[in-house]
Image (cartoon, rainbow, N blue to C red):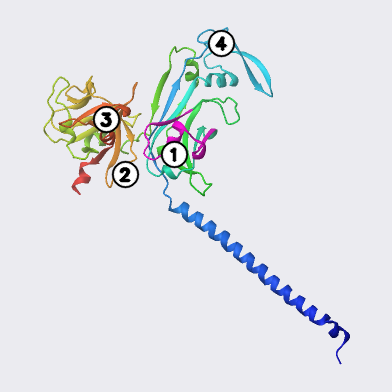
Amino acid sequence: MPSLANNLGIGRSRKGNNTFFIIGIIIFIFAIAITVYVMTRDDEEKKKTTDTLELPKVSNVGVKRTLNPDSRGSESGTAETYEIGGGKLETYQIEYNTGETFSDLEKKLLSRNIDLTVSWDNGIGFDNVTEIIFKRKIDGTVKRTISHTKSESTGDILKYFQSNQKNLSLEFDNIDDDGNMYNVVGKNTISIFVKLPNDDKEHKLWPPTSDDDIPVTIGITDLSSTLEITSSRSQMYYPVTSGFGMSNLEISNDIYTIKPSTNTQVPFSTMLKSACSSSILLTDDINFHFTMPDSNVPSNFKIKMAKDDDEWVTVCSNNELAVTSVSSQASTFEMVKSDKQADSGKYNKFLIKGDPDLFMYVKNVTPKQLYMGTITDMDVDEYTSMDMLIELEDDLSN
């Protein structure tokens, strides 16, 4: 006989509730699985997108140190009021000719007179960059970080995010991220990082290795000199090669070829004038020795022709390159690392530091001729020709 519970449907209700409960759990688990799958797939898609984007490259990186005259000049009695923290103001005075006895506060005040400017060229791939970050370190400690995002950039800053842009630059003063002054004395280095879409990681572009770093050492004497100079003085620094890893004697004895990066390969020697006073170019294809005038500066070389008669490469007053038989007239070049890769040998640039800095290049004239010039005055082909492939003659015969 049916029970009262059965007649009222209680048993069926309890069974139905259990069924709905189980179905609910299944739906809940399924929903979680779908959510995890979608989130994981999105992460994988983001990672895939980031992995497929090739990191952009920068080239021709240099750092310019500029010493500016102090606004007080040599007036030792001039006082200045500044904030020392917490809204407290204090009047301070820097005495002229204090030499190396500057206090920490005086070093910070004088550090305002020294600017550091990093310059570079963009390669391909910068159209994908969402943020570019510059970090200045002094003796290994980050003192200032400057960041620009593509979405908020305009004018010249927007060029930072465009591929194949040349002669880009950014200046550092001595104000840190919190708006406080810092002392710039020490080994200063600048690094460049970028961020890519859907990726919050900072990818380092410069320096690619520690060997490529450009250390700029600022000393107490640099601070002191800003009290004495009456006009700004700038000096460029580049990633220099440490030479060929050989002794001076080995470098002098070995014979090298020098090949500028040009569309039509012309022997290096035939682009040299026979003398500064002559309009005639050399006709013989001759290789070269490198000599190191100062073993304490292994990046500096003179170029000597590999033949019986001693002849050296010299820079004429009009920036043309010629040869001379007088060794004291031979020019000293600094070898600057090139970003261009070679299957054998090494690409370098030849630099003579000055105001302005001059680089060796092949001038776009007929016949081809070697000159020294500033980067900004070169056309595209001349700019490319600065990269010189240097190979040991013995390696070429193998």
Q: Measured along the vertical axis of the image, is residue 77 above or below residue 364?
A: above
Indicate the secondary structure of the residue bearing disc 1: helix
Circle nearer the viewer, 1 or 3: 1
Residue marked by disc 1: 161
Q: Is residue 264 left or right of residue 114?
A: left
Q: What's the CA distance linking mark 2 and mark 4?
A: 52 Å
Q: Is residue 166 within the magenta segment?
A: yes
State if disc 3 and disc 4 touch (CB < 8 Å). Answer: no
Percent x, y for residue 15? 77, 80
Q: Front-most of 234 and 30?
A: 30
Q: Earlier in the sequence, mark 1 or mark 3?
A: 1
Residue 9 appears in view: yes
Instruction: Give the residue at mark 3.
Output: 360
Instruction: State the image quarter where residue 65 is shown.
Output: top left
Q: Check disc 4 and report the residue beneath it.
A: 95
- Picture coordinates of residue 299 (x, y %)? 33, 32
What residue is rendered at 64% in x and 65% in y?
32
Q: Which mark is residue 251?
A: none
Point out the tag, 2 or 3, that comes first from the N-terminus: 2
Mark 4 → mark 3, Cα distance in angstroms: 45 Å
Quarter of the image where one finds residue 102: top right
**Amino acid on which disc 2 is placed:** Gln
Q: Is residue 294 visible?
A: no
Q: CA distance from mark 1 to mark 4?
A: 45 Å
Q: Is residue 226 left or right of residue 123?
A: right
Q: Nearer the viewer, mark 4 or mark 3?
A: 3
Magenta run includes residue 279: no
- Say what amino acid the circle numbered 3 marks: Met
Query: What is the crowding at mark 4: few (fewer than 14 residues within 10 Å), some, or many (at least 20)?
Result: some
Of badges 2 and 1, the one in the foreground is 1
